[in-house]
Each structure stands twice: as structure tokens, then as C-alpha cells.
Amino acid sequence: MVTLCCSCAIVIVENHNTCKHHTNAGHKGSYGYQKLKEREPRACIRFKCALTNTILDILRQRPGWVEVKEEGEWDFYWCDVSWLRENFDHTYMDEHVRICHFRNHYELTRKNYIVKNLKRFRKQIEREAGKLEATKCDFFPKTFEMPSEYHLFVEEFRKNPGITWIMKPVARSQGRGIFLFRKLKDVIDWRKDGVRTDDQKDETQVENYVAQCYIENPYLIGGRKFDLRVYVLVMSYIPLKAWLYRDGFARFSNTRFTLSSIDDHYVHLTNVAVQKTAPDYDPEKGCKWTIQRFRQYMTAKHGAEVVETLFAEMDNIFIKSLQSVQKVIISDKHCFELYGYDILIDQDLKPWLLEVNASPSLTASSQEDYELKCCLLKDTLHIVDMEGRLTGKEKRIGGFDLMWNDGPVSRAEGNVDTPVNGSFMANTHLGYNNDRKKQLKQLFKPLHTQQKV
């Protein structure tokens, strides 16, 4: 006799009621789960939230959702990654329970791990499909982990003397700890840590960083550097199911771009946390464009066909990066994750992946930003569907479009891979009009729901 673990659908052998994955996790399988049940509609959702920003507002406003405190039982938890690290392996979760991170999300979101996984994935594609196909993974700058790859970095550094590099701590965010450099003496601390003498063994080791080739020719608007924040929601890795949000924004630096002052963070770092500390920062004006405004600007300047190609190349970044970690991320059915992708575009209109955030900022910097994030989070909760209202066949929910469902999703009606006029058009609409309220009314109309959208 066999049964299934209620968390990860792994077969459990008779007389062993714990799956291998959860043997040391304090999570037990049950013979009552011989067949995974369809999710039933729930009238009341008990939630916990570790954050006190926009997401807490949205959860508290959601009809039928009730906040629980401290040790109360919960159905949905918007947790932080520290809770996940300390508690996930020891927490029993019923079939319907959901949390907002995958157990080892860091395979995608830590700067050193994502590069490792992308390099491995590129080699795999080259073996299986050839060099031309592997070039579709060439969207991240040349990167070395420090101090472990210090000597490899030095070899590359000496091939191209004079170019600019950027150092980033692997596990920090909001621009903290980042600096630019052009001389090896600026990173001498990481050389020391590579091979430590007996006298140095007791010294504090340097923090792990990545040294990355700096994009010296960023596309500029009004003379200023910017990057794009794009939201991708992953509901499952095996099979891979990912949604792309129509809204996002361009984040601008507050100071005109120049390579003559590499120590000026207001020139080179677009993080809002950095820019809002600039002496001449205007909180009313801010330093963001909506991604719709950015797309309109680029279309007016370069034409629709060029911009379609640019955005298709960004789609490729989202999919390839997720595929690179598909086999290493633990795809627990209780988990979903809303990622914040940071994309830089250069003067040749080539998009580059800078990083992926597991906890993209949900704190609003303006009223417009607040409204964007409220809609984003409402639609995220619609897709998580704790209420059990969806059929599972939807290709659009609010501002989200299903871009991958164990394969590419077509913009056409019908099958996921139906060609349009002989050519495939991906079901992605980043930067297009987001008429989410109209779409949600149509989606939920047959359900006669009173849900506020």
C-alpha cells in the first residue's frame, strides 16, 4: 500500500508514514491523503502577516479574511524569510495552507547563487541544444563570487584593464554595501580571505560579495540612468507555472550619469532607498515612471517593432532564470512567491538581469506607487485563491497574465501553444493597459461574489 504526503505529493511506503523530504521536518504524511483532494471553497481565511506595510492593509481589507495574532492557527501567512529559515522545516501545514516563499528561494534571489545556477543552466543548454540556443542565457554581466573566485576574477580583470566593476554583497538589499572600482587594491580584502595564513585564521572573514562587470553604457532618459522593476508570480516550479504583471516601474537616479565619479551612489544606484537620501530629492516628484509610460516613450522614440523585441527579450530573461532553478528549488505545494526582477537596458537596447528579489519592497513611495502595489497584491491573492473560486484554466487574472504553464502560453484563445497567423505570440502584456477591474468583474461575475476588486 502507498499513499501521498499531503505537502509534497511524494509516495510514502506502507508502515512509514513520513515522506523522505519531511523525515526531519516535523511534518507527517497521513493515510487519509491517499488521494489529494480538490480544494474546497472556504468562507473564512485566517491570516498572519509579518509586515506592516501595504500587504497588511490589503489582507485586512479582504472580505472573509480574519487576522490572527501570535500563536493562533492560520491558513495564510505572509511571512518574512527569517521566519521561513527558522520554522518551515518544523511546521505542519494542512492541505489548504499557503505561505509566500519557497523554502530555498535563495537559489534564485541570492546574487551568488543565481549566477551559479544560470552558468550551469547555460552549459546544459549548450550541450543539449547547441551554442546558438545557449546565447539566450547571455543576459547577466560577467560575475565572480568573492572571495572564492578571486583568482579567476583577477585573470579577467587583467584582460580588460581600466573598465569599471561593481561589488555587491550577496545577501543585502536596497543598495547597501555596494561600491564601484577600477583598481585591484580596492578589493584587496577579498584576496586576503582567499588563502588565509595560520596567523589570520582567527580574523573575521570578509562578507561574501560578487564582483560584476559594470554596464558602462546604460540607456539614459534625460541623461539619467534607470532600471526596471517587474513583478513575476510563481505558483509552482514542478511543473513551472508563472504569471507576469502588466504594471511595474522605471526607477531613475537623481543625478545625471557620468563615469567620471564612480563613488557617487546618486549617479549609479537607482534604488529608491538610496535616491531618497539625495539632498535635492523631491518626494512629491519622486524618481519613478510607470512601465506603461516607459513603453510609450520607447515606442515613440524607436518604433513598436523594436520595443516588442526588447520586451520579448525581457520575457526570455524571466523564463530562463526560473528554468535555471527549476530542479533545485523545493516546489512545495504550500508555497508561492512574488519576485521583483530588476532589469537594466543598455544603449544597444539589450536588457540585462541585475538581480531577483524574494521580498520586493511593498512600502509605497507615493500615492501612485501605493495604488500600484495595492492592485498587485490584490491580484496576487486572487491567483493564490484561498477562497477556491478559480477553475485553474484562467490565462488572465486581474493585472496578471499567465506566461508559462509547463510550457509557453499563447496570447491566442484555446490551447496554450496555438500559433497566431503561423507565429507564436506569448501571453505577456508588460507595459500595456491594465484594465484589471473590468477583467475581474467578468471573471468573478458567474460566481455572484461580493468580493471587492
Image: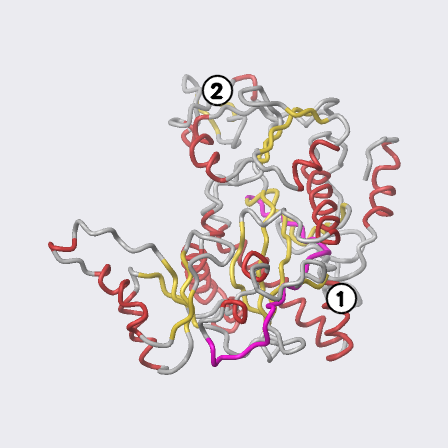
Please name the residue that numbered disc 2 is placed on. Answer: 1
Residue 158, given in percent of the width and then of the height, sits at 31, 80
Residue 185, given in percent of the width and then of the height, sits at 28, 72
Where 286 sits versus 370, above or below? Answer: below
Q: Which image quadrant is residue 164 in?
A: bottom left
Q: Which of the numbered marks, if any, corresponds to residue 185?
A: none
Quarter of the image with the C terminus in it: top right
Q: Label 1 crowding class (10 Å Cα cut-off): few <14, some 14-19, many 20+?
A: some
Q: Which circle, 2 or 1, is nearer the viewer?
A: 1
Question: Would residue 214 be found to the left or right of residue 400 on screen?
Answer: left
Where 1 sits versus 425, above or below? Answer: above
Kindly report the distance in space between the C-alpha atoms of the residues bearing marks 2 and 1.
59 Å
Residue sitting at x 19%, y 60%? 195
Residue sitting at x 52%, y 40%? 102
Farthest residue, direction left: 198
2 or 1: tag closer to the N-terminus: 2
Question: Would residue 200 be found to the left or right of residue 104 on screen?
Answer: left
Task: Give the residues in magenta.
Answer: 238-261
Residue 415, given in percent of the width and then of the height, sits at 75, 52
Residue 253 forms part of the magenta stretch = yes
| Nearer the observer, 93 or 258 | 258
SS label for mark 2: loop
SS label for mark 1: helix
Residue type (three-letter) at the residue carrying disc 2 = Met
Colouring scheme, one of rainbow, by chain, secondary structure, one colour: secondary structure
| Nearer the observer, 376 or 14 | 376
Residue sitting at x 59%, y 76%? 256
| Nearer the observer, 81 or 369 | 369
Q: Which of the numbered marks, if any, corresponds to residue 293?
A: 1
Residue type (three-letter) at the residue carrying disc 1 = Arg
